[in-house]
Image: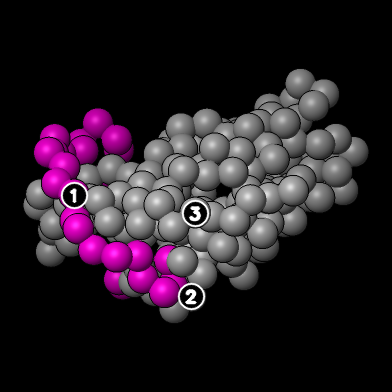
């Protein structure tokens, strides 16, 4: 039985999401800015408390994180670290609660059913390039920060099935029929869950991953 989220954890969640959609390629992780964190002392918002309660009700295990400022405008507010969403997932760093909630639901209610439908097999691992990274939108003339700089984005690169098969965005998007079907099914579902979805159809910089973030009002390509 799930325990109620304690007041201490709620306080940690924000004691110590919305920008314009990403319209440029994301900078590679190696271009991240070095930064020094500074806690933000503020009580958790109503939205964050509600989101944390939703995650707990869904059986998702997580650790609330204190709000942080990292310099240069980079922040992580209302963030947490996902510990267990029912499917092992690589490289998960700080992510905003709404992003974590939608990502966990996407894996559970879209990715795994699609794998069973297309492959007759279950997903045993989701691979990502990570979440928080203090960097600009790659190629952006204005120098605008990426949603990764606010722990509000995740890049998903591959899926491993229980039969040992590994489906990557890089090889599968234009690969065999079943890989193409699977990856497009889960993109369609992602477009109903995340305000911004960028796939290999968007540009060459996204040839090897899906970019999901919680900004904007609906952009899917």
**Residue 87 image point, x, y percent:** 68, 37
Q: Earlier in the sequence, mark 1 or mark 2?
A: 1
Contact, CB < 8 Å: mark 2 with mark 3? no
Q: Earlier in the sequence, mark 1 or mark 3?
A: 3
Q: Earlier in the sequence, mark 2 or mark 3?
A: 3
Q: Label 1: how many residues lie within 10 Å, few (<14), some (14-19) or many (20+)?
A: some
Q: CA distance from mark 1 to mark 2?
A: 32 Å
Is 49 in front, or is 20?
49
Mark 2 residue element: loop
| Residue 39's disc number | 1
Question: On the picture, is 113 further left or further right than 148?
Answer: right
Residue that protrudes farthest toward the top in the picture: 164
Q: Label 2: how many residues lie within 10 Å, few (<14), some (14-19) or many (20+)?
A: some
In the picture of the structure, the residue carrying the numbered disc 3 is 6
Q: Is residue 219 shown to the viewer in this render?
A: no
Residue that protrudes farthest toward the front in the picture: 7
């Amino acid at each position: 039985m799930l325990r109620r989220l304690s007041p201490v954890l709620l306080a940690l969640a924000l004691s110590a999401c919305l920008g314009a959609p990403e319209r440029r390629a994301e900078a590679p992780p190696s271009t991240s800015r070095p930064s020094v964190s500074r806690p933000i002392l503020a009580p958790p918002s109503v939205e964050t408390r509600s989101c944390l309660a939703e995650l707990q009700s869904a059986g998702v295990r997580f650790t609330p994180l204190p709000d942080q400022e990292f310099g240069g405008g980079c922040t992580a507010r209302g963030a947490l670290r996902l510990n267990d969403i029912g499917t092992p997932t690589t490289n998960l760093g700080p992510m905003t609660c709404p992003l974590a909630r939608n990502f966990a639901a996407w894996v559970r209610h879209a990715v795994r059913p699609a794998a069973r439908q297309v492959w007759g097999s279950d997903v045993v691992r989701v691979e990502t390039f990570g979440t928080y990274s203090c960097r600009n939108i790659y190629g952006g003339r204005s120098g605008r920060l990426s949603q990764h700089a606010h722990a509000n984005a995740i890049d998903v690169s591959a899926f491993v099935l229980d039969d040992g098969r590994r489906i990557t965005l890089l090889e599968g998007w234009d690969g065999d029929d079943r890989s193409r079907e699977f990856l497009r099914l889960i993109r369609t579902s992602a477009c109903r869950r995340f305000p911004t979805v960028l796939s290999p159809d968007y540009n060459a910089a996204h040839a090897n991953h899906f970019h999901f973030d919680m900004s904007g009002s609906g952009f899917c390509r």
